[in-house]
Amino acid sequence: MSVDQSQTLSQIIEQITGDRIHEKKGGKFFFKFYLNSKMSETPIETLDLGVRAYNSLKRAGYSTIGELAEDIASGAEISKIRNCGTKSCREIMEKLFLYQYSCIPQEKRARYILEIVEMNVVKNRG
């Protein structure tokens, strides 16, 4: 796991925007996927998920980050996967985000974080 991936979502957002976010229990986390071929072929083990989240994804047939990201982007709900509760869903989404964030060129990261913050403030208000 890279240094970027070891930071939490909250730490990254605070570092770039200066704002502290308070995670709402059971709240959803939204972001856009920007996958390249390397990311698409990367095994889900790279996400360094907890045992329950990892096993849920494996049982559901996911072996690469690309497969998982494509299904989520097309509207599949990971909460429908057996043994994938609220905490596991949030963990999976955060780890996907952190992996993607670590793959984005340094000069584009701040703009990407601002886009994500705006997207989540609007979605979580309703």
Image: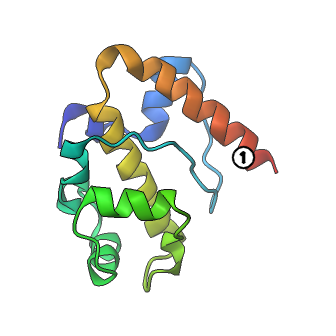
What residue lies at 35% left-to-right and 34% top-to-bottom?
A: 101
Image quarter in which the N terminus is found: top left
| 102 over 59 or under it: above or below | above
Q: On the image, numbered disc 1 is attached to which residue? A: 123
Q: Position of residue 46 (x, y in %)?
A: 19, 54
| 22 over 19 or under it: above or below | below
| 63 over 36 or under it: above or below | below
57 vs 116, left or right, is left
76 vs 92, left or right, is right
Q: Position of residue 70 (x, y in %)?
A: 40, 59
- Residue at the outermost top position: 107
Quadrant of the rendered image containing residue 86: bottom right
Q: Position of residue 104 (x, y in %)?
A: 32, 28
What residue lies at 26% left-to-right and 77% top-to-bottom?
A: 58
- Residue at the outermost right position: 126
Dot 1 amino acid type: Lys
What residue lies at 23% left-to-right and 57% top-to-bottom?
A: 48
Q: Nearer the viewer, residue 38 or 16?
A: 38
| 69 over 97 or under it: above or below | below
Q: Position of residue 125 (x, y in %)?
A: 79, 46
What residue lies at 49% left-to-right and 36% top-to-bottom?
A: 10
